[in-house]
Image: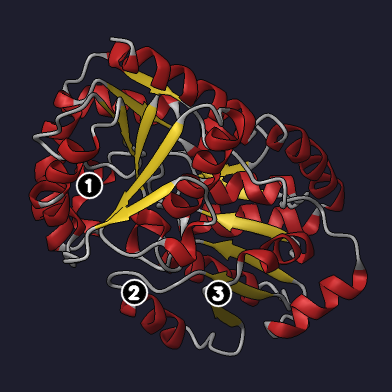
């Protein structure tokens, strides 16, 4: 088959969707080299892709991906004529000339609209229901996300294939002390620390995590809170909360961290805190587990499903619960060791080989319709 793949998420500093796209597509290509692959993007992703296949990008470079996808991509699809196209980031052309699959990771634009910028609501939220109805199949990454798609978009359940995200083999416990020391020094993490990984934006609930951390300082913890991730939309109130609570010396904003540093950062942390308000999967939870780091995460959306009893679960709206769980984990080394061991086992169940095989099966199923 000639398989088209929309690859704009590979451009620039990758976050969850970018890493998902890169890992899934590279695994698919390695598993099925008999197919031809062509990547479509509205930016020149050649320096970022680290993938095989041909790359075709529009040199007019629409800045807004949704506009490029509706205005320019249909013509490219007519010219290339792929047997099937996989759109890996929520959106697809409404006038696609080929069968297509779309990955919809979550329904956050519908569940938590106030936590997103107006442009995304105006464009993406308007387009997603039409894309979902026109798609030949939908991939999502958890049962929780599938149920939200069915409930909010009215899509038949049988049209949706749950193919969980996975964790890169690079995520494993780092035991080399020199490597751990070097990474800690690079980010100024000389004290024990609690780690958060993810974009700095309202949906991730970082303000309540900061408030919970303030309670831990009042209880006498000498830890730092390391917040790893690039700044997203409306992050100013988070920095203002740090200032208000007098925590500038205790919270380290490491910014966007190169992929190769992440396993050591996870491994050296005493625990991982991820009290997000809503996730379709929550990849940092599994990455932390793969590195043997115990996790505190939310009891809502997909996070309880992904953690599957191998993390301390909290109400993300309750600062006291977040603080109490973090303190309990700090005070109980035996619990940390238990969650570390069980987390390693849980993370081992999420492999890109499994995800790629299921995705290829769906390509072949849709392509033969």
Disc 2: CA contacts within 10 A as few (<14), some (14-19) or many (>=20): some
- At 71% from the left and 75% from the top, the residue drawn is 223
Residue 234 on image: x %, y %: 28, 72
Q: Is 140 placed left or right of 58 in the picture? A: right
Work out whether 295 lies above or below 368: below
Disc 3: CA contacts within 10 A as few (<14), some (14-19) or many (>=20): some
Earlier residue among tags 2 and 3: 3
Q: Nearer the viewer, residue 238 or 138?
A: 138
The residue labelled by disc 1 is 109
- At 68% from the left and 29% from the top, the residue drawn is 349
Marks 1 and 3, how far apart at CA: 30 Å
Q: Quadrant of residue 150?
A: top left
Earlier residue among tags 2 and 1: 1
Residue 98 on image: x %, y %: 20, 27
Disc 1: CA contacts within 10 A as few (<14), some (14-19) or many (>=20): some
Quarter occupied by the C terminus: top left
Marks 2 and 3, how far apart at CA: 19 Å
Q: Nearer the viewer, mark 1 or mark 3?
A: 1
The residue labelled by disc 2 is 235
Q: Is residue 183 visible?
A: yes
- At 64% from the left and 76% from the top, the residue drawn is 217
Q: Secondary structure at mark 1?
A: helix
Q: Quadrant of residue 125?
A: top left
Residue 151 on image: x %, y %: 22, 23
Residue 167 on image: x %, y %: 63, 43
Q: Is residue 315 visible?
A: no
Q: Secondary structure at mark 3?
A: helix
Work out whether 187 lies above or below 66: below
The residue labelled by disc 3 is 214
């Amino acid at each position: 088959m000639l398989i088209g793949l929309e690859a704009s998420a590979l451009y620039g500093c990758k976050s969850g969707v970018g890493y998902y796209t890169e890992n899934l597509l590279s695994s698919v290509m390695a598993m099925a080299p008999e197919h031809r692959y062509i990547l479509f993007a509205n930016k020149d992703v050649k320096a970022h892709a680290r993938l095989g296949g041909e790359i075709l990008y529009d040199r007019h470079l629409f800045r807004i991906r949704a506009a490029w996808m509706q205005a320019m991509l249909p013509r490219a699809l007519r010219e290339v004529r792929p047997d099937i196209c996989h759109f890996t980031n929520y959106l697809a052309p409404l006038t696609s000339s080929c069968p297509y699959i779309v990955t919809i990771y979550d329904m956050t634009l519908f569940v938590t609209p106030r936590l997103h910028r107006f442009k995304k609501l105006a464009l993406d939220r308007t387009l997603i229901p039409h894309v979902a109805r026109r798609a030949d199949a939908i991939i999502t990454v958890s049962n929780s996300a599938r149920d939200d798609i069915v409930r909010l978009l009215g899509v038949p359940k049988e049209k949706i294939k749950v193919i969980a995200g996975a964790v890169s083999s690079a995520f494993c416990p780092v035991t080399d002390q020199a490597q751990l020391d070097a990474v800690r020094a690079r980010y100024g993490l000389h004290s024990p620390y609690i780690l958060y990984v993810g974009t700095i934006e309202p949906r991730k609930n970082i303000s309540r995590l900061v408030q919970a951390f303030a309670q831990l300082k009042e209880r006498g913890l000498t830890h730092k809170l390391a917040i790893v991730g690039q700044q997203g939309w409306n992050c100013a109130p988070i920095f203002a909360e740090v200032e208000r609570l007098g925590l500038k010396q205790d919270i380290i904003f490491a910014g966007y961290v190169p992929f190769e540093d992440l396993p050591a950062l996870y491994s050296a942390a005493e625990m991982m805190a991820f009290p997000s308000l809503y996730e379709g999967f929550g990849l940092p939870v599994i990455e932390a587990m793969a590195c043997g780091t115990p996790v505190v995460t939310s009891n809502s959306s997909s996070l309880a499903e992904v953690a599957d009893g191998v993390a301390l679960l909290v109400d993300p709206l309750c600062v006291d619960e977040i603080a109490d769980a973090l303190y309990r984990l700090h005070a109980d080394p035996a619990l940390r060791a238990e969650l570390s061991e069980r987390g390693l086992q849980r993370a081992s169940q999420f492999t890109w080989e499994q995800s790629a095989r299921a995705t290829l099966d769906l390509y072949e199923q849709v392509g033969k319709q």
